[in-house]
Image (cartoon, helix red, strand yellow):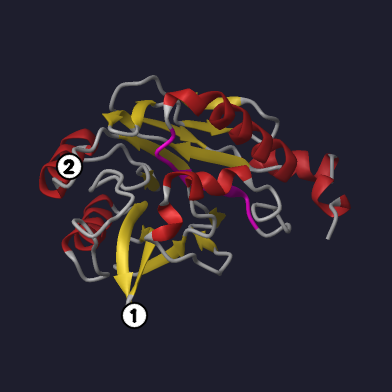
């Protein structure tokens, strides 16, 4: 399973230019199975998302579907979605056949006021794509290990994020912790650039189940890729059965 981290620098509210820039960044692809984008990859971060809120049949989701079909791969990331009178920070996972899975952010970032404008998701979401079992989570969820706990039902967890430089040590540390304690691959995709909330230093990474860094980025917009070694993961789990001994 080949994963591509697509780290961009979104211009606030200008989703058309952001998607055009992503088209250039991804190009014709690199043969990856999944292309992972940051939190709010097309709109930039808004505490009150009214200027950029989307629907599930809107242009950003349609772009994701079209991109997935063109790349013969999954394309995933988050956007603000309005549904049934509520707005969610929604992690959309577009498959190449046009179908779409999603997870609504459970832990809203009260410190910034996110909880005043978004509704909290209440479902734990694990999907399977090309044999890989994946838990979908978002940014602040990374700080909550109980919600992230592997119930022996996933092999990788994905965290799209807008994580600023002043808290980047926590990001680096917690990505590694979630991988070690859940005996899985942890895929964290941060943005780059800056906005009124701060500077974003990248540090997107794929962390292996031993806590090792498989691949990571610097602060620049870029796409980097790595292949998940599933045989190594399965051997490790068989030899050292942490998940079997976990608390329920």
Structural distance between the alpha carbons of marks 1 and 2: 27 Å
Q: In the image, is residue 243 above or below residue 221?
A: below
Q: Is residue 97 visible?
A: no
What is the tally of numbered marks visible in this picture?
Answer: 2
Residue 10 image point, x, y percent: 23, 38
In the rendered structure, find residue 192 and report the number of the disc placed on it: none
Residue, x 55% and y 69% (percent of image)?
A: 122
**131 magenta-colored:** no
Residue, x 84% and y 46% (percent of image)?
A: 241
Q: Quadrant of residue 7?
A: top left
Identify the residue position indicated by label 1 in the image. Answer: 84
**156 magenta-colored:** yes
Residue 58 image point, x, y percent: 19, 66
Residue 80 image point, x, y percent: 31, 59
Q: In the image, is residue 157 above or below residue 102?
A: above
Magenta-drawn segment: 154-163
Residue, x 49% and y 44% (percent of image)?
A: 111
Asked if labels 2 and 1 touch by Cβ distance under 8 angstroms, the answer is no
Identify the residue position indicated by label 2 in the image. Answer: 18
Looking at the image, which is closer to me, 62 or 115? Answer: 115
Residue lying farthest to the bottom in this orientation: 84
Horizontal relation, residue 247 to residue 17: left or right: right
* Circle 2 SS class: helix
């Amino acid at each position: 399973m080949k994963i591509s981290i697509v780290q961009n620098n979104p211009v606030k509210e200008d989703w058309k230019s952001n998607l055009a820039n992503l088209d250039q960044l991804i190009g014709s692809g690199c043969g990856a199975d999944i292309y992972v984008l940051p939190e709010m990859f097309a709109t930039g971060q808004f505490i009150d998302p009214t200027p950029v809120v989307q629907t599930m049949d809107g242009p950003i989701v349609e772009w994701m579907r079209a991109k997935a079909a063109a790349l013969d791969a999954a394309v995933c990331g988050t956007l603000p979605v309005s549904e049934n009178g509520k707005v969610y920070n929604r992690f959309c996972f577009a498959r190449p056949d046009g179908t779409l899975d999603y997870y609504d952010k459970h832990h809203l970032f009260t410190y910034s006021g996110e909880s005043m404008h978004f509704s909290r998701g209440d479902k734990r979401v694990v999907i399977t794509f090309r044999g890989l079992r994946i838990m979908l989570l978002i940014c602040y969820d990374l700080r909550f290990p109980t919600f992230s706990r592997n119930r022996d039902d996933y092999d990788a967890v994905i965290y799209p994020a807008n994580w600023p430089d002043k808290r980047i040590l926590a990001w680096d540390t917690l990505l590694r912790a979630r991988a070690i304690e859940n005996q899985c691959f942890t895929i964290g995709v941060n943005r780059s650039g800056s906005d009124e909330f701060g500077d974003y230093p990248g540090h997107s990474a794929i962390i292996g189940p031993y806590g090792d860094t498989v691949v990571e980025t610097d602060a620049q917009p870029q796409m980097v890729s790595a292949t998940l070694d599933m045989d190594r993961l399965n051997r490790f789990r068989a030899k050292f059965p942490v998940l079997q001994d976990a608390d329920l």
